[in-house]
Every structure is written in structure tokens, then in C-alpha cells.
Amino acid sequence: MVRRIDMAQEPHAPEMTLEQVAAIKAALAEAGATLANVLAAHSLTRDEWKRAETHYLEQMAQEALAGGEPNVAETFAAAFAKAQDALAPVPNLTVEEWARLRFAISVVGVEKAVAARGLSTADYLRAERHFARVFARDAAAAERYSEAFYEAESGRQKT
């Protein structure tokens, strides 16, 4: 579902879909991205960006307050993930490396654990989605993950 800002109701907002906003947010989440560079790549001013971003954040907040289905938030999350996955490949990690990374995160936090492995937070999110899909369809991989995680937790593996 593509949601557009209604220009008649919001004459000062740029015509931008929720998917476009999600793509820009995904680009901003990449390591080394700056707001100025990302906005320039999309031919947007800061004011145009803030109006569009605020518009959709307000829609999400209104849905949350209304207590209904979070259609805007779910659409945004799916579009963000799709856009982020298109920006870079999933990091090349084995199931065991993923388990050790997840354990390290539980000890030192996401930023330190991913940086120690030369990854960015965006890389981590891509890997998280990837391994969720892997484990959903491969019970043996999920078992290997559990074994490697508990091995790391027991101190037998370096985090």
C-alpha cells in the first residue's frame, strides 16, 4: 500500500510516499551517511524532509493512540527493511559467528560488539533479519545457533 501526503490537506509538505521516507531513513542509517549527503542525493531540502518525516511520524502516533492496527508503522517497517537490504549485502557470518556476536551484544552492547567485528549497526540489522529467516525454515541451523550461543555464554568461546 502506497501512502501519499495529500497536498490539498498539507500544502507545505513535499509529495513523498511513506516508502520514499523509509528509503531515506534507511540511507541515513548506513555507516558514514550524513543528512546533508542523503538529502542532496534525493534532491530534498531539510525543511521538505522534516515536513515529510514529521507527517508520517504523526500518522504512526495517531494510529498508536487510537489503538487500532499499526498500518502506517508496519508499512514503514517493511519498506525500511527492504530499502536497507537493497543498500548492502548481508554480512558474511556463519551461524556460529552470529551466535557469538549476539552473545557479545548481551555483554557489551550493539555498538561495541558490531564495531569490534568491523560491522555497522545497519549491517547488524540486515544480519538479524537474515538469520531470523534462516532459523524460521532451518531447525538444524537454529540448533547450531543455540549451541554456539550457550558455548559463548559459558565462557568457552571468545566473544
Image: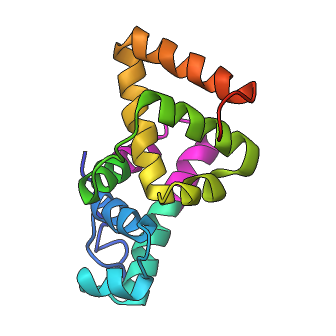
Q: What is the tally of numbered marks visible in this picture?
A: 0
Q: Is residue 8 left or right of residue 96?
A: left
Q: Is residue 41 left or right of residue 70?
A: left
Above or below, comparing residue 11 to residue 4 in the picture: below
Name the residue located 57 percent from the left edge and 41 percent from the top edge: 101
Residue in the foreground of this view, choosing between 8 and 154 = 154
Residue in the foreground of this view, choosing between 7 and 104 = 104
Residue 67 painted magenta: yes
Residue in the foreground of this view, choosing between 50 and 148 = 148
Above or below, comparing residue 85 to residue 137 in the picture: below
Q: Is residue 85 left or right of residue 123?
A: left
Q: Which corner quadrant holds the C terminus? A: top right
User: Which quadrant would residue 130 be assigned to in this image?
Assistant: top left
Residue 66 painted magenta: yes
Numbered range of the magenta stretch: 58-78
Name the residue located 31 percent from the left edge and 62 percent from the top edge: 23
State how the image is colored. rainbow
Name the residue located 56 percent from the left edge and 60 percent from the top edge: 115
User: Which quadrant would residue 27 be assigned to in this image?
Assistant: bottom left
Residue 92 x, y percent position in the rendering: 34, 43
Instruction: State whether residue 72 appears in this view.
Output: no
Per the picture, the main secondary structure of the magenta-coloured stretch is helix
Residue 126 x, y percent position in the rendering: 39, 46
Q: Which corner quadrant holds the N terminus? A: top left
